[in-house]
Image: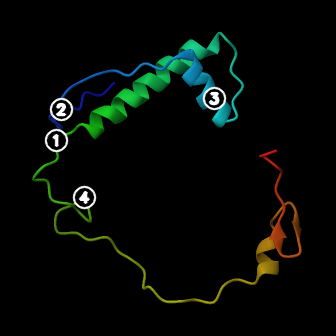
Amino acid sequence: MYDFAPIFPLRERTVPTLTATEIAAIAHLARLSLSEAEVPAYGDSMSRIMALVGELDRAVTTGVEPMSHPLPGQSARLRADVAVAAEPRELLQRNAPRAEAGLYLVPRVIE
C-alpha cells in the first residue's frame, strides 16, 4: 500500500476494523451474496480501503489554496452554459430494453 505520510502530515493513525455483521450489511446493500469463507477476505479488503480514506480525511490541509486545475497556470475548459434542444424521446428509447408510454421499464428492486 502506498504511504501518504511524506505528502500529507496526519493527525493520528488508526485502522478501522469491520465486524462480520457490518460486512454482511454492506454486502446486502450491494446485493452481494457472500459465503462464510468470503467474509474475512472482504472484511480485510474493506478495512484497508476505509483506512486509506481515513488517512486522506485526516490530512492537515490548513493553508492549502483550492485549485481549479492540478497544473499551475491552467484552468479547466468548460463548455458554454447554453440551452440546447433535447434529443427526441423516441430516438433515445430505441436503445432501451423496455419502454412504455415514454417511460423506461426496469426490474423491481424494492419490494
Q: Which residue is mark 3?
A: 27
Neighbour tally class for label 2: few under 14, some 14-19, many 20 plus, Cα within 10 Å: some
Amino acid of disc 4: Pro
- Residue 70: assigned label: 4
Q: CA distance from mark 3 to mark 4?
A: 36 Å
Given the image, on which type of amino acid does mark 1 rest? Val
Query: Mark number for residue 92?
Result: none
Do callouts 2 and 1 mark residues in contact (Cβ within 8 Å)? yes
Residue drawn 83% across and 76% down?
102
Neighbor class of circle 1 (other Cα within 10 Å; few <14, some 14-19, many 20+) is: few
Q: Which of the two marks, 4 or 2, is nearer to us in this view?
A: 2
Residue on which the image places disc 1: 60
Q: Element at badge 3? A: helix
For the residues labelled 3 and 2, say whether their Cβ atoms are less than 8 Å apart: no
Q: Which quadrant of the figure has residue 33? A: top right
Secondary structure at numbered mark 4: loop
Q: Amino acid at mark 3?
A: Ala
